[in-house]
Amino acid sequence: MKFFVDTADVKDIRELNELGLLDGVTTNPSLILKSGRSILEVTKEICSIVDGPVSAEVAATEYDQMMKEAAVLSKIAKNICIKVPLTLDGLKACKALSSDGHMVNVTLCFSATQALLAAKAGATFISPFIGRIDDMGINGMDLIAEIRTIYDNYDYKTEILAASIRTVNHVKEAALIGADVATIPPATLKALVKHPLTDKGLETFLADWAKTGQKIA
């Protein structure tokens, strides 16, 4: 499974990238707002830090304007992935952009039929929103499973990018089902390493090592 971090905070991106476990970054208008920076400026800096795909989202809702914005965003760096909404205009833009060789992330997916349309439009990534579906009292993981089955049925190459992840368990379940990518908030990504028995075991080892009086280096 690939790990993307869902943030426009350059400090967090640098820290996580230095671990050697980061495969890409996703941003959206809300994260750009939170960064307090220009979308072009902050996205360019992110692209200079991370080698993998960096999703930059268009703000337009109509096809012609989407394409104009995509043309600007795509010039930021070679690893830009244009992010478009799952609407008819968004799918039309996805088809045009992907046919022209651009990576495209189709976002705001909440149904398997939407995901099917995105795959037919040539999307590089489809972003089903797990957490927001959970908020409706429906298991978001069921959607991941449905998309996995459909994509496997027809050998679609579109990668399932599990989004709106809020817990460590979301990451685990998405990996078990077979999502290709998880885009994870920085705090949740860091929490993946945590386990009380790991902490307890390390504490014991360190205490015993201290009693030996030895040094390795």
Image: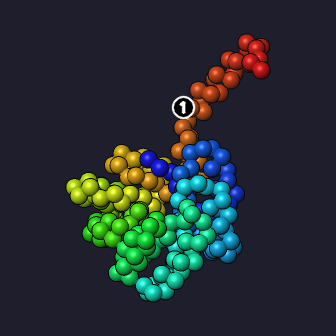
Residue appearing at x 63%, y 74% in the figure: 39
Residue 146 in percent (x, y) is at 27, 58
Residue appearing at x 56%, y 32% in the figure: 198
* Residue that protrudes farthest toward the left in the picture: 153
Comparing 110 with 122, the one in front is 122
Comparing 165 with 161, the one in front is 161
Element on which disc 1 rests:
helix
Give the crowd class for mark 1: few <14, some 14-19, many >=20 residues within 10 Å: few
Residue 214 in percent (x, y) is at 76, 14
Comparing 42 with 74, the one in front is 74
Residue appearing at x 55%, y 36% in the figure: 196
Whether residue 178 is visible: yes
Quadrant of residue 46 within the rendered picture: bottom right
Comparing 12 with 45, the one in front is 45
Q: The C terminus appears in which quarter of the rendering? A: top right
Residue 91 vs 21, above or below: the answer is below
Q: How is the image coloured?
A: rainbow
Q: What residue would you read off at disc 1?
A: 197
